[in-house]
Amino acid sequence: MHIAMVSAECAPIAKAGGLGDFVQGLARELTRIGERVEVILPAYDVLRFDGLDRPRPLGIELQVPFAGEVIQCRVLGLSLDGYECRLIAPRSGHGFFERGRIYGEPDDAERFVFFSRALVEYVSRPESRPDVLHCNDWQTGLVPVLLAERRATLGRIPVCYSLHNVGYQGWVEAGLLAAVGLDPARLLTPERLADPSDPRRANLMKGGIAAADAVNTVSPRHAWELRHTEQGMGLQSWLQRYDYKFGGILNGIDDAVWNPLTDPLIPAHFGPETLPHKAIDRHALRGHLGLEDAADRPIVAIVSRLDRQKGVELIAHGIHSALSAGAQVVLLGHAIEPAIAERFERLKSALDPNPHAHLELGYDESLSHLIYAGADMILIPSLYEPCGLTQLIAMRYGTVPIARRVGGLADTLQDANYSAAPFEQRNGYLFDEPTGEALNSALDRAIALWRDHPSYFSQLRLNGMRGDYSWRRPAREYLALYAYAREARVRRD
């Protein structure tokens, strides 16, 4: 099967968050099991090619209508882990993807609406037409709509649409629809793209859900939450309407990248049979960050974006609580919102003299590996979490998660004390309410077990390390979803 995955991100060349890991991991596994995979991205000026061949021109020129002009785009290509990556590079004074970053521009809506229109031009070429097209998040939500509107000339390409973060739905003005040749008067209706909270705006995610042949999110629990709780962010009834084609598939992690037995970024390798070697990485982490080498204190880590979704109030609370409970704290995180960034800068300044705390404000891929390997526990107090890779990576490295019972966190964690699962399946600590008191309860239980019953705590580590968090099972589920999309397309036609 020829699978084209279209996304704003794909690690390692374009990564701003978990979406990049998702595309890389799924593309790699689908390729491994024999599928033909093509990943299509914008040609950002911040693409990273460390250790990779530079992209090559493919001799493909696209003529993309946009806002009354025709913008030429080159298509570049390179190979990544056996699959092909296509980069769409506009020749335009707009500088759509020449901004020094992937997201965060005032005209992000315009940039990705243009990319969606260019993508449709690419897959309209007979030699580029995939058997199924896999779109991701709001940045490509207009693609299913554009394809549906061109079905008379293009025919129907089966489309699967994955929702990773419905906190960002792609709200755009009517003029942007017209800029890519769509009719706003016909599409800005409650039955199509009109946003539920402001019918004058188009909601690209809403449109993508309606027009795609299959829709999913990245964990079964989150699929339920999107339909039945405020986590649907206004799309609850819309997803209930399309319940027949909507479900959840739990993400995996790339076990070639995240493997403590082979990880080149940590000083000591270890696995379930050699867990004591983790102590070497703990010592290295303390030395690297200047923490006191205190054998009587566990290390509680936080590796996270610092934004409201991730529970910044609870993160700050958890730092103080862990220190008060006699633990050491390590944070690696970055904030885009200025008020949050300023708050954590102040917190860092206040804690810098403390020999048991280190806050690293930014993102450092190498340091994240050392933190996962050296920490004892990891705090994940998300307000909502579609899937979460943090807990999966942490468990692989023998670091016990302390997390809020939402989304994929609830799907992947069994509480050490309050679970019907056998002890050998318990792998972390969960709390329900987004309050400091609830967090403290889970944190205190974890620290008490580490201090008073180290052998039981080691067993929790081993339980987590022995789980299968790879892409093998999810990839098979995505193949079934693609088959459903293709069958649905045949039935519609």
Image (cartoon, grey):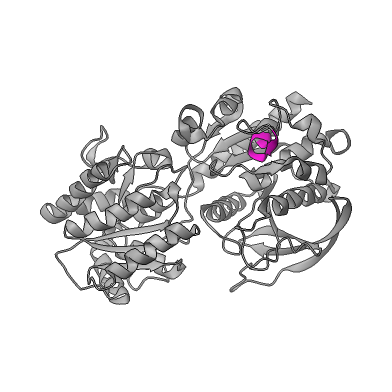
Please identify the quarter of the rendering in which residue 341 is found.
bottom left
**Residue at the limit of the structure toward the left, as seen here:** 452
Considering depth in this image, is 213 or 191 the residue closer to the camera? Answer: 191
Tell me if residue 71 is in the magenta stretch. Answer: no
Considering depth in this image, is 400 or 30 the residue closer to the camera? Answer: 400
Q: Which quadrant does the N terminus fall into?
A: top right
Residue 469 drawn at (x, y percent): 42, 48
Tell me if residue 207 is in the magenta stretch. Answer: yes
Please identify the quarter of the rendering in which residue 269 is found.
bottom left
Q: In this view, does 136 lie above or below 377?
A: above
Instruction: From the viewer's perspective, tell me whether residue 109 is left or right of residue 400.
Output: right
Part of the protein shown in magenta: 200-208
Q: Residue at x 40, y 55 (%)?
A: 393
Instruction: From the viewer's perspective, tell me whether residue 215 is left or right of residue 427.
Output: right
Instruction: From the viewer's perspective, tell me whether residue 345 is left or right of residue 88.
Output: left
Considering depth in this image, is 257 or 321 the residue closer to the camera? Answer: 321
Q: In this view, does 194 lie above or below 342?
A: above
**Res 400 seen here:** no
Considering depth in this image, is 372 or 442 the residue closer to the camera? Answer: 442
Residue 257 drawn at (x, y percent): 47, 62
Residue 298 drawn at (x, y percent): 21, 61
Please identify the quarter of the rendering in which residue 172 is found.
top right
Instruction: From the viewer's perspective, tell me whether residue 293 is left or right of residue 268.
Output: left
Residue 440 drawn at (x, y percent): 22, 47
Count of numbered labels shown in the rendering: 0
Q: Which quadrant does the C terminus fall into?
A: top right
**Res 278 seen here:** yes
Q: Residue at x 70, y 58 (%)?
A: 42
